[in-house]
Image: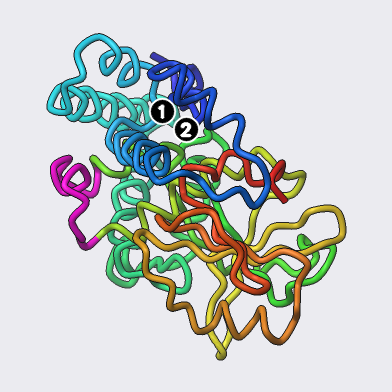
Amino acid sequence: MSIHSDYPLTFDEYLSAVDTSLYAYYCSIEKNQQIEDIFHSRLLDAYNTYLIIGGMPECFASWIQQKNPDKISHIQEELVSVYENDFSKHNGKINSGRILMVFRSIVTQLAKENEKFMYSAVREGGRARDFEEAIEWLVSAGILNRLYNVSKVEHPIAAFDGLDCFKLFVFDTGLLKHMAGVDNRAILLKSDYQFKGPLTENFVLQQIRSQFDAEPRYFSDKSGELDFVIQHGTEMIPIEVKGGEDKSAPSFKRYVAEHQPDHAIRFSKRNYRKDGLITNLPLYLACRTKELL
């Protein structure tokens, strides 16, 4: 299996394969529509299941046949091993150790909820020059998604990238869940677990990346942080991501109040609704962000 052969399926592709009637309802949801509780809860269940399976075709095929979460974990374990073995084959011997170290540090990086990727979390005393090439390789191979921090939330957003300030996410949320050691039952039982925030952000990024012309960014300064910023035409859309129903987000709310953007999106497990300038989109609608603007 080569590194490039598998592109993860998005949530809507998953839904269309596992539940055609629920998928039909999902596609019929219109802008600012109140979603009936029964459908909201079924779609949230589907979202939770997707967090466990992720979008890797092998996991997907196994789920459709057996619906066994333990089997999924076993396949994810094998996939992570395949990728890690590929690192050493693909890049000669010089950098393969560093590629592996960067890849294995992602969970720790995200769990710390740092404002940016920390080289010292890869290896004590680690510097940019030690790991830059390894990061470039992983991003180019499509294994990691890099999210740049911007110094200003303005158009064109790429002009404000802080090239030395970024976060790295994993290209498939199911694999990240497995790498972090999140137990499938924690997700199915809808309990709170340590890694819920980063896992949810990884999911949202995976779903929204392909919808917009520019890659998403994030913003952080002394006043706080925006989880994501999306450029849509000349408009800047701030995004807050919540793993549950909690809606406290002081820096997001402050940003929205100060800048009055045309669109401001909070992804969470709450129903589809508009709160003033903020639109709450249920997490399962992340794939449809652009069409629901």
Which numbered tag is attached to residue 144?
none
Q: Are marks 2 and 1 in contact (CB under 8 Å)?
A: yes
Please state which of the two labelled residues, at mark 2 or mark 1, is closer to the viewer.
Answer: 2
| Left or right for 287, reference 124 | right
Q: Which residues are magenta?
A: 179-194
Q: How is the image coloured?
A: rainbow
Asked whether 99 or 201 is in front, the reply is 201
Q: Circle 1 sits on which residue?
A: 55
| Left or right for 20, reference 195 | right
Asked whether 124 or 202 is in front, the reply is 202
User: In the rendered image of this protein, does residue 127 appear above or below residue 200?
Assistant: below
Q: Position of residue 37 (x, y in %)?
A: 40, 46
Q: Circle 2 sits on which residue?
A: 11
Q: Position of residue 252 (x, y in %)?
A: 56, 77
The three-letter code of the residue at mark 2 reads: Phe
Q: Position of residue 186 (x, y in %)?
A: 16, 49
Quarter location, residue 201 = bottom left
The three-letter code of the residue at mark 1 reads: Gly
Element at label 1: loop
Q: Position of residue 145 (x, y in %)?
A: 52, 46
Quarter location, residue 46 = top left
Q: Residue at x 56, y 69 (%)?
A: 165
